[in-house]
């Protein structure tokens, strides 16, 4: 079989792409609604999709209701996967579709899955092509591929982010950790996200430095003024971070002045990225309406419907405002219910 031949491929009722909180929640609800969903969780290597999503890069999650003692991001996502698989969700692995019974439920996120390579949303049922010799057709799709935080790309930044060494791309997720209380911290960026992160961190930190590469904030006027008026925030203008110092924990950042090229060390106990996010929508290849920043546009912000009937979106791929595990999970629930109603209306639900 030629996997790229659009006439090939069996028909699925519902395919869910992505396996963060939105994807697994959609899968859980769809499975319990007897839609027999198929999930394409993504693969950590090579492409952007990662089984478990952004939470796999978060250490402690203390703001997800139901976990009174907190939980690590990877453990939480393992629980999400386990719960969905318990209801028989099937997943696309590198060797094709596997039923939940054939997946090691305790290591579900470490199964070698596939990425989605492309979609044809002009075909009905939609055509879904994986990147490892897989294709199927689907009456309905839920896009839950998320967004990835932008990083500076420094070696020590990544090392300390992955080891829980005080470097993070989410102040709301990690800022309240005890290690940051009453400390001096830094946020990189000059946009609304950076201001929001810095302002949030002032609840815990003694002082927050905003490191901005220019002499003017990109943030909206009201947000920028909020940062400038906050006595606990100091903006360091015309500075870029060139290194992150510290063995197990961050101790300082090395800054370079963009005008004088002068290097300096700034001691901080935390470093947060506020340099934007990139939604994972490239594989859609212009077939779904996106906003200016590349996020999937929802017909109505309260729903999950998109510009193509039968295609639903959930989680950070369609939300650049909240970006929380709990909001993504809620959107996944909505998308599954919307998909269920759509399939029922079309008479495609059995
Ligand atoms: P953004 O507006 O694109 O700002 C990114 C910031 O990071 C810019 O200041 C940029 O510097 C800086 N930056 C980018 N790459 C960098 C690098 N490699 N090194 C150093 N600095 C770098 O992104 P955002 O703040 O995430 O906002 C995205 C969208 O969401 C915006 O439309 C924003 O208004 C919206 N948003 C709204 C709210 C709210 O209203 N509450 C909150 C968050 C986000 P330059 O300025 O020099 O380019």
Image: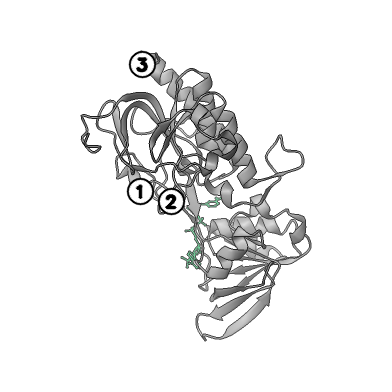
**Label 1 crowd bin: few (<14), some (14–19), many (20+), radius 10 Å:** few
Q: Name the residue under label 2.
A: 48
Please report contact status of discs 1 and 3: CB closer than 8 Å, yes or no.
no
Q: Is the CB atom of the residue marked by disc 3 within 8 angstroms of ligand 1's nearest atom? A: no
Task: Find the distance from the CA under tag 1 to the CA under tag 3.
Answer: 29 Å
Task: Find the distance from the CA under tag 1 to the CA under tag 2.
Answer: 10 Å
User: Residue 259, position in %: x, y?
Assistant: 50, 83
Residue 216 visible in the current orientation: yes
Task: Find the distance from the CA under tag 3 to the CA under tag 2.
Answer: 32 Å
Q: With respect to residue 97, does 178 lie above or below?
A: below
Mark 1 or 2, closer to the camera: 2
Q: Name the residue under label 1.
A: 282
Please report contact status of discs 1 and 2: CB closer than 8 Å, yes or no.
yes
Q: Which residue is drawn at 56% across and 63% down?
A: 158
Badge 2 element: loop
Q: Residue at x 51, y 27 (%)?
A: 101
Badge 3 element: loop
Badge 1 element: helix
Q: Earlier in the sequence, mark 3 or mark 2?
A: 2
User: Residue 23, position in %: x, y?
Assistant: 50, 35
The tag on residue 348 is: 3
């Amino acid at each position: 079989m030629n996997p790229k031949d659009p006439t090939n491929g069996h028909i699925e009722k519902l395919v869910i792409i992505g396996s963060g909180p939105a994807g697994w929640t959609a899968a859980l609800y769809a499975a319990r609604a007897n839609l027999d969903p198929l999930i394409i969780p993504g693969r950590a290597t090579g492409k952007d999709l990662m089984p478990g999503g952004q939470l796999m890069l978060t250490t402690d999650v203390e703001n997800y209701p139901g976990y009174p003692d907190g939980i690590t991001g990877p453990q939480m996502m393992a629980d999400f996967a386990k719960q969905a698989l318990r209801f028989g969700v099937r997943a696309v692995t590198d060797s094709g579709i596997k039923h939940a019974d054939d997946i090691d439920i305790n290591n579900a996120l470490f199964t070698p899955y596939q990425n989605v390579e492309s979609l044809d949303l002009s075909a009905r049922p939609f055509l879904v092509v994986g990147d490892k010799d897989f294709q199927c057709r689907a009456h309905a799709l839920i896009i839950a591929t998320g967004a990835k935080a932008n990083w500076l790309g420094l070696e020590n930044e990544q090392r300390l982010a992955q080891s829980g060494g005080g470097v993070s791309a989410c102040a709301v997720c990690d800022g309240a950790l005890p290690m940051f209380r009453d400390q001096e911290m830094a946020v990189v960026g000059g946009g609304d996200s950076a201001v929001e992160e810095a302002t949030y961190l002032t609840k815990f930190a003694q002082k927050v430095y905003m490191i901005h590469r220019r002499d003017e904030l990109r943030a909206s006027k009201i947000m920028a003024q909020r940062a400038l008026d906050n006595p606990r925030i100091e903006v360091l203008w015309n500075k870029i971070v060139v290194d992150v110092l510290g063995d197990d924990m961050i101790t300082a950042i090395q800054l370079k002045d963009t005008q004088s090229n002068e290097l300096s060390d700034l001691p901080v106990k935390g470093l947060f990225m506020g340099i934007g996010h990139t939604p994972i929508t490239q594989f859609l290849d212009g077939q779904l309406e996106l906003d200016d920043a590349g996020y999937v546009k929802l017909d109505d912000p309260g729903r999950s419907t998109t510009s193509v009937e039968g295609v639903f979106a959930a989680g950070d791929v369609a939300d650049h405002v909240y970006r929380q595990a709990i909001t993504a999970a809620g959107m996944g629930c909505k998308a599954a219910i919307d998909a269920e109603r759509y399939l029922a209306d079309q008479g495609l639900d059995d």
